Image (spheres, grey):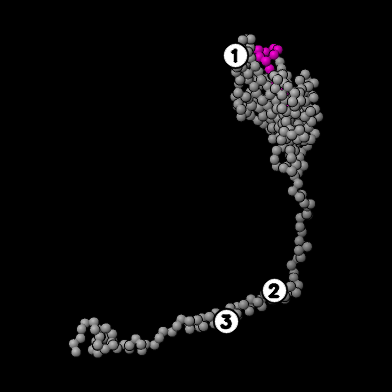
Amino acid sequence: MPTQSGWNPNPQWGPNQGPGGGRYAPPRGQQPPPVPKWRKWPYIVIPAVALLLIVGGFVGLRVYYVLAVEPRQPSAEPTREAVPTAPKTAPTNGEPKPPKPGAPVPCAPERPDFQQCFPEDYNPDAVMDGIATEGWNCLRKGELTEVGSPVTEPRRCETKDNVGQPYTIRASIDYQTHDFRPTGKLWEFNLDVSTTAAAHNGERTTAEDPNKSLITVFEITAKHIWQGKPEQLKEATEVFEQLKPHCASAAGRTIKGVSATTPSGYEISCWATTPVASGDIITHGQSLKIRPA
């Protein structure tokens, strides 16, 4: 029988193979089936489990020995009580350290890290009463000032002078309490000085003039603020002496101003307001503030 290329007349031979060519292979149905992989697992798992049991047993015996046997044996190491320790101190319960004498204190005890105020032994009304003895006119909140505006601070002292200089000096001193409450602690003192000149009266003034009067106003106020506290008064006076030339400089005549702090922790700062002109009348002003830093 003629054969065709690619056609195998005997199914036991491979394609294009016959008795004379190629290697004989048994038919596919007569080959032994491959061994399933799951039959190999016992040969791997059983030795691994046995090894784990041996290791686990050894670890268990060691733990038992450490926990049950070793504690019964005497130890040569010193006991914990024999080790010297630093003496224990009483807990502070988070309470802040008491302030130095004369130093600022928290305005609100429940918020010690916030705003600072003058100590309780600073009496602002006594300061105002002392300034009144210098010839100043002292008013209380709600009363009208010389220019007709109501006083908004707890107390305010003011004065005016137009003798001996070609301008009119107006000065005021007031104080403010924490959170602007009547019962709040003393927070700050404000000193304001202005010089006004009317050209039609032959008067004249410059931005340097208020600073001269501000020095006098500070000296009057400081001695009453720190009355009976010579150390703090000395500190404030010395710091202001260093600050005076800066207050008189161009930097001290700006809104930002300049400042310095006393060793006890009180800040003294000065700055100037923008000149106000109305017709041929001009006013220059400068301010100073004393408050806890």
Per the image, the residue denoted by label 2 is 66
Taking depth in this image into account, of 93 and 280 the one nearest to the observer is 280
Please identify the quarter of the rendering in which residue 203 is found. Answer: top right
- Near mark 3 (Cα within 10 A), the count class, few <14, some 14-19 or many ≥20, is few
- Near mark 2 (Cα within 10 A), the count class, few <14, some 14-19 or many ≥20, is few
Q: Residue at x 65, y 23 (%)?
A: 286
Label 2: state its secondary structure.
Answer: helix
Q: Which quadrant is home to the N terminus?
A: bottom left
Is 59 magenta? The answer is: no
Asked if residue 140 is positioned above or below residue 164 in the image, the reply reads below
Per the image, the residue denoted by label 3 is 50
Asked if residue 234 is positioned above or below residue 38 in the image, the reply reads above
Which span of residues is magenta-colored? 162-174
Amino acid at dot 2: Val
The residues bearing labels 1 and 3 have C-alpha atoms spaced at a distance of: 110 Å
Per the image, the residue denoted by label 1 is 280
The answer to whether any part of residue 216 appears in the image is no
Label 1: state its secondary structure.
Answer: loop
Taking depth in this image into account, of 206 and 73 the one nearest to the observer is 206
Give whichever of discs 2 and 1 has the lower sequence position.
2
Q: Position of residue 68 (x, y in %)?
A: 72, 75
Q: Which mark is residue 263?
A: none
Give whichever of discs 2 and 3 has the lower sequence position.
3
- Near mark 1 (Cα within 10 A), the count class, few <14, some 14-19 or many ≥20, is few
The mark lying in front, picked from 2 and 3, is: 3
Amino acid at dot 1: Asp
Q: Position of residue 205 (x, y in %)?
A: 62, 16
